[in-house]
Image (spheres, coloured by chain):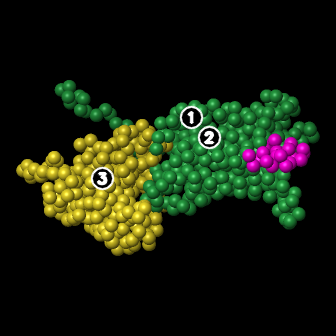
Chain colours: A yellow, B green
Amino acid sequence: MIDARGIVVERMGRPIVSDVNFRAAAGGITAILGANGAGKSTLLRVLCGDCRPDRGSVRYFGRPLADWRPVELARRRAVVPQSSALNFPFTVAEVVLQGRAPHLERGAPGVDESAAAAALDAVDLARAASRDYTTLSGGERQRVHLARALAQVGLDGGGRCLLLDEPTSSLDLRHQHDVLRVLRRFADSGGCAVVVLHDLNLCMRYADKVVLMHYGRVLGSGDANAILTPDWLGIAYGLRVRRIEAGRDVLFSAG
Amino acid sequence: MALAAIAAPPAGPPDLRVQLRRARVRRRWQFAGLVALLAGAGLAAMMIGPMRIPPRDLGAWAMGRLGFPAEPIGAAERLVIERIRLPRVVLAACIGAALATAGAAFQGLFRNPLADPGLIGVSAAGALGAVGIIVLGHRLTPALPGWAAPFLLPVAAFAGSLAAVLAIYRVSLHEGRPVMATMLLAGVAINALASAATGFLTFLATDQQVRDLTFWLLGSLGAASWPKVALVAPGVLLGLALLPFAARALNALLLGEEEAGHLGFDVWRTKWIVMALAAVMVGLSVAFAGVIGFVGLIVPHAIRLAAGPDHRFLLPASALLGAALLVAADLFARCIVAPAELPIGILTALLGAPFFLWLLLRVKVAWQP
């Protein structure tokens, strides 16, 4: 679904991302992990097309990013930023309905509203539809933007991609799991979800594939169980990490 | 039991579809209200003045003009209506609509509710273009074909405005995002630069030219006439008709440029179209009425307070309210010190500057990057 090869990004002569190959398959959640400054967000920005790599190429569904018309791509791929600069008093419903923009000329009447309502419901904001976005808390804003992306590509992801940059960074425990369950459903129905995550426990529980980054390179990638080991994590974070197996759950503790 | 009572969420709001339908109905009424407001302001401006024109005469004139049988009205009344008041009302409406819509467009483009064409130097740069033609234009005209001469002034004003928009946009970008404080400071610099250049031109000007110039610098609708309306109206109507096509893209731009791109909008094209159309509208306004500040600030803000920032409503609603506001302000400006006239730019600044300060107090929080 998403295939990036030989990605190199340099800033002021210093490599931020070097020689990264990245694949995210349909029907799975691919998590990008790593310490601060390891190049996770830059890699995601390259995958989105916001950052043009100095070398390398990105393909969606086998087609180079540059060959997609913006609106065509927008119908099949949504991006959730870590935070948004929006400071105008839209209502929550208005922000979420913006996700329908690439579909507008094609939709039957009521389709946009239904998609927006379903998306708001999925992130537990159905009650907040008429609230002023600028009065929401950071976590609520994050969920609004996720809902906007879900309104854009649908809750069931067949043939579509969803890219998210730390979607759980301001969320409470319950909503963290809500968001990852939404991603799980998206992936299980054939979608391709790529998510930058910090939380090892969430990653262990929900990700199908983990890409562990370290100083702009991919330290290891593969099955979560194989990558999230004390050895790998110790290198990636420069910290002793213990892995605690508790019945079916695996938990991580640092220090 | 107490825990269950707390855990049960309060009754929710109605279904999203119902909410959206209600919002649409409310906007339709608000739009109708604005149309009525503009009509009211226009009628008042037609009737009130040194010569009072009663509604009956106005009605008879309109009926006669439309080809219905009506009792004739006096020649003097007819002259006042057709030659003096109507062109002035139409010009005021055009310019009010242009300034307010351009203000709303700039605010969307810069993602900043403080972007007013007067404040960020777009009007001053347009005025510089106009003043340049007044003072130096006679050296250019012999080289041009005769039909081009009347267009020289508006084209120069447009060029000045567009140059200012481009400069401010370029300067205020930081890592691809416009920064609020930088934008206003760039506006201060461009205002200063344009004023200095205008001052220099004034220094070169003859006495007659200096009198023409003061008109530009204060803003006035006193010289309204049908030929001027004919030059202003097409450009303004073009902007009013085309800008709404960019409304969805402007909504998406408020989320951020990258976000707008992810929603499938061609961000570069949108920015260019919006900048060019807004510069045309400001340039034309400045060319024919001088610098009238703060209309582009007050009007979109009032609409946003009442109906939210959705550009699909904001742009046309700002046009109506801006037109109504400027028609009313012009009426006030020519009545308050009658038989003299207060330059309308002074009036809008007297109203607008305190409003701007109040707005600064409110949005101060958002200044932190």
User: Is residue A247 something that shows in the picture?
Assistant: yes
Q: Chain of mark 3?
A: A
Q: Quadrant of residue B294?
A: top right
* Classed neighbour count for the residue bearing mark 3: other residues with Cα under 10 Å, few (<14), some (14–19), many (≥20): few
* Classed neighbour count for the residue bearing mark 1: other residues with Cα under 10 Å, few (<14), some (14–19), many (≥20): some
Disc 2 to disc 1: CB gap under 8 Å: yes
How far from the left and from the top, in percent, is residue B281? Answer: 69, 51
Q: Secondary structure at mark 2?
A: helix
Q: Amino acid at mark 3?
A: Asn
Look at discs 2 and 3 and give the one toward the viewer: 3
Span shown in magenta: B196-216
Q: Secondary structure at mark 3?
A: loop
How far from the left and from the top, in percent, is residue B284? Answer: 73, 51
Marks 3 and 1 belong to one chain? no
Q: Which mark is residue B213?
A: none
- Write down the residue under mark 1: B359
Q: Residue at x 37, y 39 (%)?
A: A137
Q: Is residue B141 left or right of residue B23?
A: right
Q: Residue at x 64, y 46 (%)?
A: B189
> Closest to the observer: B296 or B238?
B296
Based on the picture, tell me whether residue B26 belongs to the magenta stretch: no
- Write down the residue under mark 3: A36
Please tell me whether residue A205 is drawn above or below residue B34 in the rendered image: below
Q: Secondary structure at mark 1?
A: helix
